[in-house]
């Protein structure tokens, strides 16, 4: 669907956290996380950086182009 | 996250109002233009709702970017305006293509009413449909998360 792949679900699974916990941590709604994971919504740079900061990885390790 | 659920609720209320007012006006325009009887009270109610919808739309347009602090809601709301434009364009192009035939039935007033009706229906319908699809996927994720 989207041209951008992401590894959020994998990184979440490694940390054993739910979508809600991740959403609360970076101050967005759970639906934002869910739609980013499924590729129905491409996030802004701000959210991408917040995610990278939370997982402590580079943005490129979370998002990549098809 | 209570502010987000409140914003989501507001967005859904806006969408339902758009859809209801839009459908009412579109159906009313078609009924009246084809000489089908419409109750005067319902016509008045439709006009009042139409004014309310126009006011609400302009009010929302003024602060479209700051109304929703959540990115997902902002994205859906902005996207819905594309569908509103498509909704308005469909009857407009239909009127342009079939003007000779449709001119027998539709006055300018009811053509405008139909355009506004389809515009709001498309906008409200898109938000509600998108919300339905995304909620379905959210529930699936919930099962996977074990939350």
Image (spheres, coloured by chain):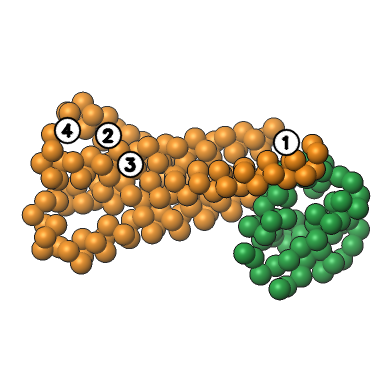
Which disc number belongs to residue B125? none
**Gap between marks 2 and 3, in whole Å?**
10 Å
Q: Earlier in the sequence, mark 3 or mark 1?
A: 1
Q: Earlier in the sequence, mark 4 or mark 2?
A: 4
Which disc number belongs to residue B23? 3
Q: Mark 1 points at which residue?
A: B1
Residue A36 x, y percent position in the rendering = 70, 55
**Which chain does the residue under circle 4 lie in?**
B
**Gap between marks 4 and 2, in whole Å?**
11 Å
Q: How many marks?
A: 4
Q: Name the residue under label 2.
A: B46
Image quadrant holding the N terminus of chain A, namely bottom right
3 and 1 marks in contact (CB < 8 Å): no
Q: Name the residue under label 4.
A: B38
**Gap between marks 3 and 1, in whole Å?**
33 Å
Residue A15 x, y percent position in the rendering = 91, 49
User: Which label sits in the foreground, 3 or 1?
Assistant: 3
What chain is colored orange?
B
**Crowd around label 3: few <14 · some 14–19 · many ≥20 (10 Å):** many
> Looking at the picture, does residue A65 appear above or below residue B25?
below
**Which chain does the residue under circle 3 lie in?**
B
Q: Which of marks 2 and 1 is nearer the N terminus?
A: 1
């Amino acid at each position: 669907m989207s041209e951008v792949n992401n590894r959020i679900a994998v990184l979440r699974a490694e940390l054993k956290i739910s979508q809600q916990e991740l959403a609360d941590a970076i101050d967005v709604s759970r639906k934002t996380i869910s739609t980013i994971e499924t590729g129905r919504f491409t996030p802004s740079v701000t959210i991408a950086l917040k995610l990278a900061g939370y997982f402590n990885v580079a943005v490129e390790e979370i998002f990549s182009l098809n | 996250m209570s502010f987000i659920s409140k914003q989501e609720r507001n967005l859904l209320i806006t969408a339902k109002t758009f859809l209801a007012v839009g459908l009412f006006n579109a159906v009313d325009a078609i009924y009246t233009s084809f000489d089908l009887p419409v109750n005067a009270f319902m016509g008045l109610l439709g006009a009042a709702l139409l004014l309310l919808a126009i006011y609400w739309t302009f009010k929302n347009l003024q602060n479209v970017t700051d109304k929703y602090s959540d990115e997902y809601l902002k994205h859906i709301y902005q996207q819905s305006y594309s569908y509103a434009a498509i909704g308005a364009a469909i009857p407009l192009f239909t009127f342009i293509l079939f003007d000779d035939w449709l001119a027998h039935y539709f006055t300018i007033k009811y053509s405008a009413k139909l355009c506004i009706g389809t515009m709001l229906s498309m906008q409200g319908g898109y938000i509600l449909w998108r919300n339905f699809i995304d909620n379905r996927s959210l529930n699936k994720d919930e099962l996977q998360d074990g939350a």
